[in-house]
Amino acid sequence: MLKNIVFTEKPEEEELKERLKNAREKLMDQQMQIKEHKIPVLVLVEGWGTAGKGSAIGQVIQNIDPRFFKVATMDQPTEEESRKPFLCRYFSKLPEAGKFMLLDSGWMDEITRKRLHDGMDKKTYEQRIDSIRRFERQLTDNGYLVMKFFFHISEKEQKKRIDELKKDIDTSWRVSENDKWQNKHYKKCEEVFGQYMEDTNTPSAPWYIIDSKSKRWAELQVLETLTQGIEIAMQNRSLAVPLLQNVFPLVKMPKLSEVDLDKCIEEDEYKEELEKLQKHLGELHNRLYRKRVPVVIVYEGWDAAGKGGNIKRITGALDPRGYEVQPIASPEPHEKARHYLWRFWTRLPKTGHVTIFDRSWYGRVMVERLEGFCSENDWKRAYNEINEFEKELHDWGAVIIKFWVHIDKDTQLARFTDRQNTPGKQWKITDEDWRNREKWDDYEGAVNEMIQKTSTTYAPWHILESVDKKYARIKALKIVIEELEKVLK
């Protein structure tokens, strides 16, 4: 993609000056339209060392209100970042709707460096490429404008710039060891960069290669391409996105109406099993930490089904320094203004730690679907997006355990009534709980579809029969232990 590039001829100075003026003014006008239409813009700036990426970013942001943009330099991942999924630190940088995020290097730089310096194997590379394609497609499907620029200069031009910068003590610091290494191994880098761009060049997030020999010409190319992209994004913002067919292996699951809820356990047996299982789980937690295995446990279920008590019996066995419970409520304004998975990507555990989600990303295909908080295209698309998200976690090495805590309608009514009539429990019951109960049949249909479409072999659903809460707690502990033992072997 780089070797055969033929650039448009640089315009004469007067034309360049006029087009720069027009492009700058256009971007200044468009930023208000971006804000009004709530379109988030992610600009990725990659390229050769000394190609002028930083200068170009500095010129572009002069045309945007400082309140509407952020710039981030993405160095190689820290040790802390390396203990999270590959995409985690990039998801965390996503801009809010109506704002710009400009990244000085990003996921391309991270992957190509690992290929060039660390000898990333073919399997890992292909896995990363799949992750990036899904990541960029999910962003554009969810209304993001993703603009990817690569600043290109020749081997000779890069050498010239390195030498000029090194001559002056005040600019020599700007030449990194990686810049010098690139120039020394230019052909090898060119091949790896070109292959990466070919592998990630898609219609919804194409690469734009910038002729960077002239600073002002490079700025004009970026500005004209960016403003054209914004124009198209505003025209297409109301278009529905095609739904993708599921490609992930699924586990056949029963409908909720087919689940036998008569299962129970005697008090004495419950106490004995609880003590034994919690002790065993505590031992496994120590091994998880030593082997740096991350664990993600998801709880969904009917209101008053006993999620809280179930979670308490799991956490009661764990070292408090090694787990976190994330109670998920309605999204805050800054969360609602981003990709709906953003608030979950930013809550994932480090390797060796456990995160328990009390409700989760499945709200997209339940409450958001039924209460009209997202479009039909949004929630229908979400099944595949969730399977992709969980595949990322699985490929990272996480154990994913998903529970649906199940009761019948009569049991829920009895528990609601008890809560309402018991002063110490009244905080647990809200008007919204009663309203949701009126939609029981609609929710049951949505849950059945959710379980059928997202119970994958790498992240299957487990239904906890919770009319007898004690039975559900013991079953949950046994499942967690079984899943952890599989990976620890």
Image (spheres, grey):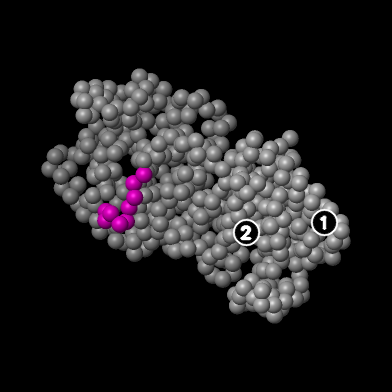
Q: x, y (%) of residue 446?
A: 65, 65
Q: Earlier in the sequence, mark 2 or mark 1?
A: 1
Identify the secondary structure beneath mark 1.
Answer: helix
From this view, report whether residue 141 is shown above or below residue 264: above
Given the image, on which type of amino acid does mark 1 rest? Answer: Lys
Identify the secondary structure beneath mark 2.
Answer: strand
10 Å crowding of disc 2: few (<14), some (14-19), many (20+): some
Q: Quadrant of residue 180?
A: top left
Residue at image mark 2: 358
Asked if residue 114 lies left or right of residue 384, the reply is: left
Bounds of the magenta span? 64-72
Residue at image mark 1: 271
Q: x, y (%) of residue 232?
A: 36, 55
**70 inside magenta stretch:** yes
Q: Is residue 258 visible?
A: no
Q: Nearer the viewer, mark 2 or mark 1?
A: 1
For the residue pair 26 and 337, the one nearer the viewer reads as: 337
Given the image, on which type of amino acid does mark 2 rest? Answer: Asp
- Quadrant the N terminus occupies: top left
